[in-house]
Image: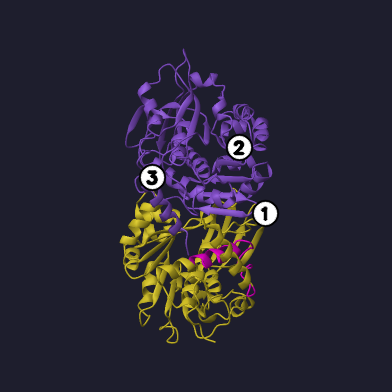
Chain colours: A yellow, B purple
Amino acid sequence: DSPRAQPEGLIKLGPKSASQVLVVGSVAYDSIITPDFSAERVLGGAAAYASIASSFFAPTSLVGIIGNDFNPALLNRFRDHHIDISGLEQHPTEKTFFWKGEYTHNLEHRITHITDLNAFAHFRPQISEHIKTVPFVLLSNIAPELQLYTLNQIKGNPFVIADTMNYWIQNTHEQLLELLKRIHVLVINDEEALELSGESTLVHAGDKLCCLGPTHVIIKKGEHGSMLFNQDGVFALPAYPVRNLVDPTGAGDAFAGALIGGLASLRQHSSKAIKLGMAYATAVASITVEAISCDALLPNISSEITARVDVLRQMGHF
Amino acid sequence: DSPRAQPEGLIKLGPKSASQVLVVGSVAYDSIITPDFSAERVLGGAAAYASIASSFFAPTSLVGIIGNDFNPALLNRFRDHHIDISGLEQHPTEKTFFWKGEYTHNLEHRITHITDLNAFAHFRPQISEHIKTVPFVLLSNIAPELQLYTLNQIKGNPFVIADTMNYWIQNTHEQLLELLKRIHVLVINDEEALELSGESTLVHAGDKLCCLGPTHVIIKKGEHGSMLFNQDGVFALPAYPVRNLVDPTGAGDAFAGALIGGLASLRQHSSKAIKLGMAYATAVASITVEAISCDALLPNISSEITARVDVLRQMGHF
């Protein structure tokens, strides 16, 4: 059954068919240390989290690269969600992108110990013909040059969300500014929003980033929720009150993935649709952090997602 | 005209009669330094901000102490709002409580340079007969012993909101715990909530503080808004998007004052009423920070308060 426009206030959760969403970005092995546990070489990478998050709402294709050491059994994590991984390239000689990080101070601070790009250093996203006409695209956090390279292969006029990070803000500023003129939604965290805008408050940062090209700017604030800036003004959503925070890795990536999937399910990208999508994105992000890696993003969590959206709706109602 | 229960979703703003609200706390001279300006000996003190904020919604009495150096003309700031200052004692020999502080890092960090208690060290709140039956009481940030001393003079069964600060959490912990058992709402900022609860996240802190006595716990998060914890769960309100932040002093005090005044206007203290009151409190706090001292809290801002509540309602709607 193909996705349809949904009744107001509902995003479809269910079986999928031809891809409506393209997610491009990193698939990685993560080693994660927290005060309570450590995990070695678990599934990670922005596009891994994002594609799984998107798949709850709409048929999703993943374009990325893995190395020759990637455990084939891990591919079932994508297949379980009916994600199209025909665009997930395997490098014949390089290893998989590897990230090792540690969370300290009640999981509030993150320290990166190792970033080995490995196969990811050779990543040149190749978009197959069957995906080129997809109506919703998420360019997760990779070099702006590769985000632009991806967009240049797309046909039609897709709705495009992009994420970025401090490394690209500092080192590829011009290409990032070029990218901003070609996307519809910039999803960015609070520190990066201040850095990219040069402003000192989030409200001013949101205003200014909108002037750089995107129709909508979403600032992710972790436990403080998220804000949307566009010509309608400011929209603010609290975080879902997580009482069992295990591993913050990938929360922002899952947020972006659920957002693009939610919009694809709605077949809309109005300001109203984006607000609703942000609620679903917040719900999925809150589930993501309740287990290590993508382990909490199981195929059977649809009813939990919907329940958390209902809680979020009540949380902001007065 | 005396206040009445208001139509749903509206808090009355208008003329006042016999006091419905008692605010007890400090009235001070503040000297404030920011990157953009400095101001010497302007009106300050938690109860000054709170009583003015309350007065927009309900007839309010202020109980506090000033010194022999207090400029009588400043009393007009209270009279302009029809605040009953018959309980504002003047010490014959001591000076007025004096605080000097500096804001740095884009007004995010506050450094206290001077705290001279002066007359305030001799403060023993005396509640006159005509105020003892007031139905809504705000115990703003003073020693828990004085907050209890005030409560012990009150007749009837008022609805009580209390604020506190790190000094009392650290130095008068037992009395603070005794106070918590006798109040209905604790209003506290994020850092203090973590300190008082011993928890590492705000969600756990809010849960735990509710167990210490208050029916409702409100955590103030500055630019990230506020959260309400009670048996219904968690309610979250964003901050109003201030684009002209001048002086953060008193924002939290104005928030608490507008909340108690709003509830008095509604003549209700249900969870629903508190949520609506928090929206008015957020609006008043956002206006407070747009000028130094209490200068932005002018008698004619009622329509601006209502307009900001409307913005807040839209900001959280999806």
**As drawn, A275 above or below A55:** above
Q: Amino acid at mark 3?
A: Ser
Q: Residues within 10 Å of mark 1 (few under 14, many from 20)?
A: few
Q: Which residue is rendered at x = 53% and y = 80% of the image?
A: A85
Say if mark 3 contacts mark 1, CB within 8 Å. no
**As drawn, A60 above or below A295:** below
Q: Residues within 10 Å of mark 2 (few under 14, many from 20)?
A: some
Q: Which residue is rendered at x = 58% and y = 62% of the image?
A: A311
Furthest residue toward front: B1
Q: Amino acid at mark 1?
A: Asp
Q: Position of residue B212 (x, y in %)?
A: 68, 41
For numbered disc 3, what is the local secondary structure? helix
**Subunit of label 2:** B
Residue B164 occupies which quadrant of the picture?
top right
Mark yes or no: residue B58 visible: yes
List the residue tagged with mark 3. B302
C-alpha gap between disc 1 and disc 2? 46 Å
List the residue tagged with mark 2. B158
> Relative to the observer, which residue lies in front, B313 or B3?
B3
Task: Decide if residue A83 is on the left or right side of residue A211.
Answer: right
Q: Is residue B284 magenta?
A: no
Residue B48 occupies which quadrant of the picture?
top left
Q: Position of residue A95 (x, y in %)?
A: 55, 71
Circles 3 and 2 on the same chain: yes
C-alpha gap between disc 3 and disc 2? 26 Å
Q: Amino acid at mark 2?
A: Pro
C-alpha gap between disc 3 and disc 1? 51 Å
Q: Which residue is rendered at x = 40% and y = 20% of the image?
A: B70
List the residue tagged with mark 1. A36
**Subunit of label 1:** A
Q: Which residues are magenta?
A: A278-300
